[in-house]
Amino acid sequence: MTDLPKIPLAGVIGHPIAHSRSPALHGFWLRRHGIKGHYIPMDVAPADLEATLRLLPRIGFVGLNVTIPHKEAVLKIADVITDRAALIGAANTLIFRKDGKIHADNTDGAGFIANLRQNAPNWNPAAGPAAVLGAGGAARAVVAALIEVGVPEIRIANRTRPRADALRADFGAKLSVHEWVQAGNMLDGAATVINTTSLGMAGKPEFRVPMDALSPGAVVNDLVYNPLKTQFLLEAEQRGASIVDGLGMLLHQAAPGFERWFGPTPAVDEETRQAVLGS
């Protein structure tokens, strides 16, 4: 009996965590690939974070997804940190290596770009400026990804300006900071527009930035996926923009972790979307 292989375990840690759709996503992929593994949601308080990360590899866990409020804190615990996780200042994917080290990565930016390329196939990063609303952790991942794929200029606005200023200080001269009360103006001529805030999410205040200046041919993405089509996206669509919802980013950012933990490269397709939406 001792020769039986271990069942690989992975999961997502946050506080709270009951809202997460990651278990439905990874559970679907495990079933699709016939893998005898499990993916478990775990509500971990900040005070218990390090003890949890030290224990889980010893009981069969091969890795974790990380969500609020632990994305920054795990960098202080990880043994190996990728350049992009260090640049963004947060990790969303942990791999528990066989040598005992905790490897931290951030796949949010890659997931963001993959979502745009899949759902707005004519999107051209070099077509013009990008306007980014928000300056939190998600915005940092988005900005890093936009720079990497060659967006020529990035305009940032945040409800509290110092966070936007910090983003510019970290990422450089391609960024320009705009006052939140004038955020609508930075949409003028923008080829790509991204809402990285929680505005418009179910239970949160509505998105109220005026969109009169939005170009009809712009690609507009909302990282919010509950509701799937936010008021922000509805208005952008009415103004002739190509819209991309936020669910694809959730799906694409998850794929690299699944591959590292369980082996197969999972496909992000309509069946996957429906499995998560139906959860």
Image (cartoon, grey):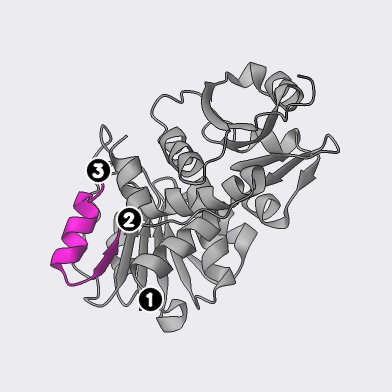
* Residue 59 placement: quadrant: top right
Marks 3 and 2: which is nearer the front?
A: 2
Q: Give the percent coordinates (x, y) of residue 260.
A: 66, 48
Q: Which residues are magenta?
A: 227-245
Report the Cα–Cα distance between label 3 and label 1.
23 Å
**Where does residue 41 sit, x and y in percent of width and height?**
50, 26
Q: Residues within 10 Å of mark 2 (few under 14, many from 20)?
A: few
> Residue lying farthest left?
238
Q: Residues within 10 Å of mark 3 (few under 14, many from 20)?
A: few
Tell me the tag on residue 227. Answer: 3
**Looking at the image, residue 176 lies above or below residue 233:** below
Residue extending furthest right? Answer: 99
Q: Residue at x 54, y 77 (%)?
A: 150
Q: Earlier in the sequence, mark 3 or mark 1?
A: 1
Q: Give the residue pinned by disc 1.
A: 123
Q: Secondary structure at mark 2?
A: helix
Q: Amino acid at mark 3?
A: Pro
Horizontal side of 111 relative to 73 (left or right) equals left
Question: For the point 52% across and 41% down, which residue is it?
Answer: 34
Question: Does 159 sit above or below residue 244?
Answer: above
Q: Is residue 17 left or right of residue 3?
A: left
Q: Secondary structure at mark 3?
A: loop
Point out the frontmost of discs 1 and 2: 2
Give the mark, 3 or 2, whose residue is nearer the N terminus.
3
**Residue at mark 2:** 270
The quadrant of the rendering that contains the C terminus is top left
Quarter-of-image position of residue 75 = top right
